[in-house]
Amino acid sequence: MRRLLVTGGAGFIGANFIHYVMAHTDFQVTVLDKLTYAGHESSLKGLPPDRLTFVHGDICDEVLVDALVAGVDAVVHYAAESHNDNSLAAPLPFLQTNIVGSYVLLEAVRKHGKRFHHISTDEVYGDLALDEPLRFTEHTPYNPSSPYSSTKAGSDLLVRAWVRSFGVEATISNCSNNYGPFQHVEKFIPRQITNIIDGIRPKLYGSGENVRDWIHADDHSAAVLLILQRGVPGETYLIGADGERNNKDVIEAILVGMGRPADAYDHVTDRPGHDLRYAIDSSKLRTELGWTPSKADFAAGLAETIHWYRDNEDWWREQKAATEAKYAAAGEQLAGAASRQGR
Ligand code: NAD
Ligand code: DAU
């Protein structure tokens, strides 16, 4: 398996995966990316041009997808609308890309008999209480909360159906919250880092008690490559690095890491339907495939990420004003939804 089609390779995790694959294999990679507001071809700058082909296009384009899938050995499917807040403001693109786009890819790998790996999220399992020891496993029932996570759950179920009904050789991985370079500034960690650089106070939704299970994007990439090479078709693998932290602790760590007082942030209106806690039990991946995270030191990874955003303002500057304008415009609508829910 040497020729990969990577969908969404100009996005955050897809780009990190391609950097990882270029450094650790001799694979040829074709990227298919629509370059939505979240896609940046510059994230792939400097990679060897003889091993990388970039195709600007939509995963919903059946003719294009068919032709590209015919020419590779395997497809790694990252492309998605990925941001919960956007899915609350405008859900339709999430249905189109995450469900219809995944269907188009599945039909193409079915027709051409190609290996498929589907990138998914721990959010398909809903959330956990703050004070229970439970973590998600491959057997946790699906219970998604947001338009985003429900479309990711829908795409996972399509993959399972194409495995069972049509014998497609597919694996699925559900990963926890990633952080690292090339993450869009709409997301929690880069939003706060770039706010601080711009002299804006970081924004914490609600009380900040919500817990996310942080993993460095490189550890996610290593796990995906391993599943692609040694995973069992038809199986699902959960990916997580035991990185549970509440949002308040993370925002304080960012502030202190950037030389500001730990309390120099604002509480803002909570996200409607905000999931309380995610936590991954990745025993299956560790015991069956021998994966271990190599960047599980969150403090070190966060310091490196702060450094990256300080050093790469050229990469994020253009996104920043548009992102904050989108948050400002959505603010009233989200606040309205939250108050209707009695929050
Ligand atoms: P992202 O928003 O940074 O990137 C998404 C990429 O997909 C962009 O380059 C965009 O241009 C492209 N894209 C969107 N619609 C497309 C379409 N119709 N056709 C072709 N390309 C299209 O997302 P991300 O954070 O890198 O997430 C990538 C994948 O990983 C998603 O499937 C997401 O559900 C999953 N995931 C993300 C996380 C996380 O913490 N960010 C965790 C677990 C799983
Ligand atoms: O768990 C995996 C998921 O992680 C992925 O499937 C999603 O694609 C990815 O976006 C991420 O979802 P979250 O909703 O957890 O990520 P986000 O960065 O939007 O928010 C992380 C937490 O921080 C969440 O509890 C909301 C909170 N938050 C977010 C923003 C943008 C704030 O408190 N303030 C903010 O400004």
Image: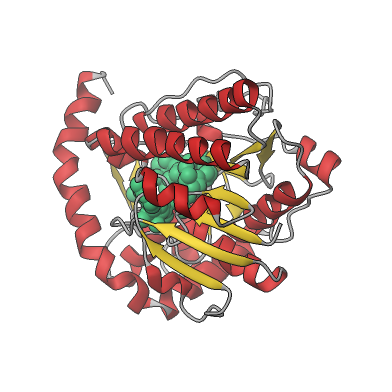
Pinpoint residue 342: horizontal percent, then vertical percent: 25, 18
* Left or right position of 127 against 204: right
* Residue 138 against residue 78 in the figure, above or below: above
Give the residue drawn at x 44%, y 70%: 43
Q: Nearer the viewer, residue 110 or 196?
A: 110
Describe the colour scheme in one phrase.
secondary structure
Q: Nearer the viewer, residue 227 or 295?
A: 227
Viewer can see residue 206:
yes
Pinpoint residue 256: horizontal percent, then vertical percent: 48, 65
* Residue 110 against residue 15 in the figure, above or below: above
Viewer can see residue 187:
no
Quarter the N terminus occupies: bottom right
* Left or right position of 153 against 333: right
* Left or right position of 87 against 153: left
Pinpoint residue 251: horizontal percent, then vertical percent: 45, 54
* Left or right position of 230 against 52: right
* Residue 160 against residue 63 in the figure, above or below: above
Give the residue drawn at x 22%, y 36%: 89
Pinpoint residue 167: horizontal percent, then vertical percent: 66, 28
Give the residue drawn at x 72%, y 35%: 233
Q: Quadrant of residue 320?
A: bottom left
Quarter the C terminus occupies: top left
Give the residue drawn at x 45%, y 65%: 182
